[in-house]
Image (tube, helix red, strand yellow):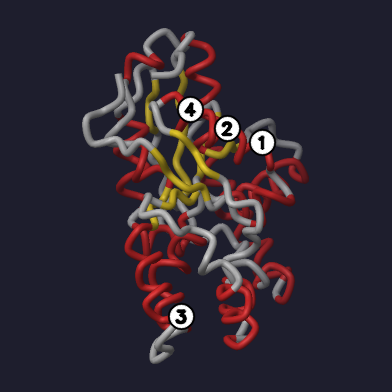
Amino acid sequence: MPSPDTPGDVYLFATCVIDLVSPDAGEDAVEVLERLGVRVHFPQDQTCCGQPAYTTGYPEEARRVAAAQLDLFPEPWPIVVPSGSCGGMMVHHWPRLFAGDPVRGPKADAIAARVVEFMAFVAPRLDPGLLAEAPPTRVCLHTSCTARREMGAHRTGSELLRSLPGVELAVHDHEPECCGFGGTFSVKHPEISAAMAQDKTDALLATGSDGFVSGDCGCLLNLNGTLEKRGAPLRGRHVASFLRERMDAAGGTRA
């Protein structure tokens, strides 16, 4: 049965990185939400939240990108975002982009109030019984810098993983640190980015974990690429994919 406070309907803002690089994570997010008893609505015209332009110093371009999304979520349903970085952009920076705009400002504020990061939505509503028969595993959590600062994803992510039957959460000593991706940072400063990713993957490998999970596909792209280059077997998965795999292994079905 769905949790009593689980809404019947949600929007999914899937993010451009998931759309272009990791569509399986978006599909898995939909599947997990549906197994919680939620009807998922995906506005087809959604694109990017505008964060790459915004954090690179192009607020006008970011404003145009964000403006194109403002009318895509007309119903008063939660907007679930499987990325703490994009969620943080929508919650904290869309209202700033449209501050003083009498038309778009209230729309941005209303959307910001309804945005929920994926792990924060799932954690209080997931029935552990859906995963009870999944095999034991030991994993680390990686949260992106923005997800950590702006959405508290390190807390909700830890809460979620610790609640899962058969899952041991291994804490690594670089968990609060950046993986080196940082959107365009990794392109503008590749040497620094590579050194940061090296430190991060050293810490992940030192735990002896079976893998790691994250709520942000940009970080996963960077860390998995670094691990592959190093010839290390460790890999990370989006938390939605991790949950779906464990649900499938346990025979968990829709609520």
The relative height of residue 67 versus residue 177 in the rendered view (above or below) is below
Query: Can you give x and y, in whole percent of width and height, for residue 251 in the image?
Result: 48, 8
Distance from Cα at disc 2 to Cα at disc 1 = 6 Å
In percent of width and height, residue 60 lies at 61, 88
User: Mark 4 or mark 1, which has the lower sequence index?
Assistant: 1
From this view, report whether residue 149 is shown above or below residue 124. below
Marked residue nearer the N-terminal end (4 or 3): 3
Near mark 2 (Cα within 10 A), the count class, few <14, some 14-19 or many ≥20, is some
In the rendered structure, which amino acid carries the disc numbered 2?
A: Asp
Q: Earlier in the sequence, mark 1 or mark 3?
A: 1
Q: Amino acid at mark 1?
A: Asp
Q: How far is the residue under mark 2 from the one under mark 4?
A: 8 Å
Q: Could you tell me the amino acid type at mark 3? A: Arg
Of the residues tagged 2 and 3, which is closer to the observer?
3
The number of numbered badges drawn on the structure is: 4
Distance from the alpha carbon under mark 1 to that under mark 3: 33 Å
Label 1, on which residue? 24
Q: Are marks 2 and 1 in contact (CB under 8 Å)?
A: yes
Which disc is residue 104 wearing? Answer: 3
**Front residue (pair 247, 157):** 247
Mark 2 lies on residue? 28
